[in-house]
Image (spheres, helix red, strand yellow):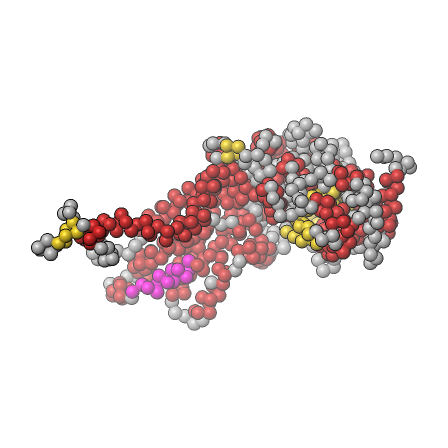
Amino acid sequence: MSAIAPERTGVTSDRTGVTTDRTGVTTEQAIEGSQTIRLAPNYWPFVVPALVVVGAVIVFPWAFTLWMSVNRWTLGQSRSFAGMENYLRLASDPRFWESLVHTLTYTSLSVAAPMFFGTVAALIFDARFPLRGLLRGVFVMPMMATPVAVALVWTMMFHPQLGVLNYLLSLVGIPAQEWIFNARTVIPSLVAVETWQWTPLVMLIVLGGLASVPREPFESAEIDGANAWQQFRYLTLPMIAPFLMIALIIRTIDALKSFDIIFAMTQGGPGTASETINIYLYNTAFSYYDIGYGSAMAVVFFIVIVALSFILLMLRQRSQWIDAEGK
Amino acid sequence: MSSNPFKPTRRQVLAGTTALAAAGLAGLRPSFSASVDWKRFAGTTLDVNLVKSPRSDTILKYIAEFEELTGIKVNAEATPEQQQRQKTVIELSSGKPSFDVVHLSYHVQKRQFEKGGWLADIAGYLADPTLTDPGLVEGDFAEAGMLFAKDSQGVLRSLPFSVDYWIVYWNKELFEAKGLKYPETFDQLVTAAEALTDPSTNTFGFVARGLKNANTPVWTSLMLGYDMTPLDDKGKLRTETPEAIEAAALYQRLMTKSAPPGVTGFNWAEAQSAFLQGKIGMWFDGVGFAPPMENPEKSRVVGKVGYGVMPKGPKAHASGTFGDGLGVTASSEKKEAAYLFCQWAVSPAMGARLLQAGAGVPFRKSVLEDPKVREGVTMPASWLDAVVGSGNISRLALPVIIPVTEFRDIYGVALTNMIAGADPAEELKKATAQFQPVLDRSEQG
């Protein structure tokens, strides 16, 4: 900062023109030091708004959730400190562990299926054929629908007596299914809805990746006699890997926090067959009003999400494009 | 209070005459007692929180009448049941709710509201002749209503608004085709349900709620027929008793042998839809779900539906009873004005409107027994007979405890598992072991 007056720091100039102070420190060093010491206090007010916002919307809710999780607190009753009681309760709560398994199953399937179908769709829509634009527009339409509206429509379609799906099955001689009304088929049925709605998102991301893939390596591969599968496996797939990773991260986060479709279609049933942690947490906090226990569940679920995100970010680092110099 | 109908008290005579006067109903402007100073709180603004339902729709429809009568301005909000329950509990537990009058579901919230101390004592208002219509007396409410409205100390905390008895809707056409009569006992109910079932024609003899939580009242209502309730008078669970197991086994048999596939996902709405298609012999649920039966736009069974009182169980004849009421919040600064609103909402005029539209059944006997009111009822006479008949054998179907939702959830899962083939005794044992600590914790705080 040139505005700092040299005389204030007791600066003198020697014959070589290098400016030093009494301690032998150069002006440049002194300016740097004085900036740190004297100017920093003038800047901190500018950070306050950001700190307040971050504190209010991120730090405080989390601190409050942590505090609630160590309290015995049901709405309408007195609150008391419970220490780790809620966490110990979680460890011995079979319904929590069951909901964790449901969450992981639902998430894995709801990520894998749209990733597969979305990639296939992207490869199809990357090719040139008549009405491609129109069909691509139609294909992305499910993504634009409101999840609750989607859930209601599919619930009607899944109805064992009145639903269109069983009618279609009956046309080809397949017996009626119970879809979301049976404990064994409920999660695959819910995943089918999730896949129907979110495959287009994966398709759009991968399509973007395919558009950025250079043509030259494919021309070389063709000259070398590589078939279509080999071109896909050794050229296309590595080159769209970063895009697939982005789709994977988005889908995983989306599937983990999925609530609306499950709640609107099954409310976690039949029984607890499709109860994910989100649904159990919601029921605990807002149907049973057991705020302390619900908060402990939220904290544990948060840790699970952070761990998964960490793994995904590590994988993303590994999927980056690497040039010839290894950069 | 005299319980002999031939020796009425002065208050009961006043109640009867006022009820008759107030029943100047259909199309006529209802009269309200001149002894009450209705304008006493003119200029006040009240905030009212209601559950969205045909019952609250009736209140909202006529709210201008209350405003004109009292000069009180009403800001009423009606939200769907689940959201309303969450909102009211959160606000009430904060100590500063945004409403003066709250609509509560007794069968779920009664004990919770008592424990929280959220409702004002209105017994004094009821006894005040300048504030209360002489017709509004405790004796005019069905017994279940007063059980709901008073807390464990016997203090009146709300006014009973609408009652829901569980009845059996039955398809007369299907019964006639099989030469069957309406069942009078549980055994006959099972026999008829199985005789009516023919999967090859997609016809099923029985449907009821199979969805977790929603299904628990079906079981507890059946349990009443075994003269058993989920808890005894001291609050001890009786869900593993032979009677409870028998009721669960009955539920399992009806739902596995006579109900349509996928019934584990059925709440009342899905069961009602199935019944409206004309392929279901009997549907067991609340009397308040009747209006669509007789609506040609929604129903294929118009004119074919019988409305039956719950068949007799092996040990008792009982109709599971549920209800809702209106209370004044303890923190309200306008308690008396809020009480006037509650009084107007449960008045004979409003009760008659509810009943005649099929929107609900008032708790007040003077309304149900009034011939003029009965004449104006749009539902078939057999429906009204089922209402009155159920009222005579009414018993609370859910326990009066704080964790009603957990009770319904935990036992609901057990019932769902039974439909999938699990053993009733084992499931009830597991559910009881799971619920007991929840129940213990609930009264500790």
Q: Which residues are magenta?
A: A202-214
Q: Which quadrant, please, contains the C terminus of chain A?
A: bottom left
Which is more toward the observer, B4 or A39? A39
Task: Work out whether residue B168 can be spotted.
Answer: no
Residue B113 rendering spot, x and y as whole percentages: 65, 39
Report the residue that reaches farthest toward the left.
A15
Judge from the rendering whether residue A223 lies leftward or rightward of residue A206; answer left or right.
left
Please tell me which residue is depicted at 76% across the width and 52% down the height of the picture: B70
Please tell me which residue is depicted at 65% across the width and 48% down the height of the picture: B99
Task: Work out whether residue A141 can be spotted.
Answer: yes
Residue B392 rendering spot, x and y as whole percentages: 80, 39
Which is more toward the observer, B52 or B327? B327
Give the prevailing secondary structure in the magenta stretch. Answer: helix
Residue A221 rendering spot, x and y as whole percentages: 26, 63
Rendering quarter of residue B136: top right
Q: As displayed, is residue B62 above or below residue B2?
A: below
Q: As displayed, is residue B402 above or below residue A46?
A: above
Report the residue that reaches farthest toward the bottom.
A130
Judge from the rendering whether residue A193 lies leftward or rightward of residue B231; answer left or right.
left
Which is more toward the observer, B412 or B396? B396
Q: As displayed, is residue B106 above or below residue A251?
A: above
Q: Which quadrant, please, contains the N terminus of chain A?
A: bottom left
Q: As displayed, is residue A235 above or below residue A69?
A: below
Residue B57 rendering spot, x and y as whole percentages: 71, 54
Please tell me which residue is depicted at 82% across the width and 50% down the height of the picture: B32
Please tell me which residue is depicted at 73% across the width and 40% down the height of the picture: B122
Judge from the rendering whether residue A222 lies leftward or rightward of residue A127; answer left or right.
left
Residue B436: say if magenta: no
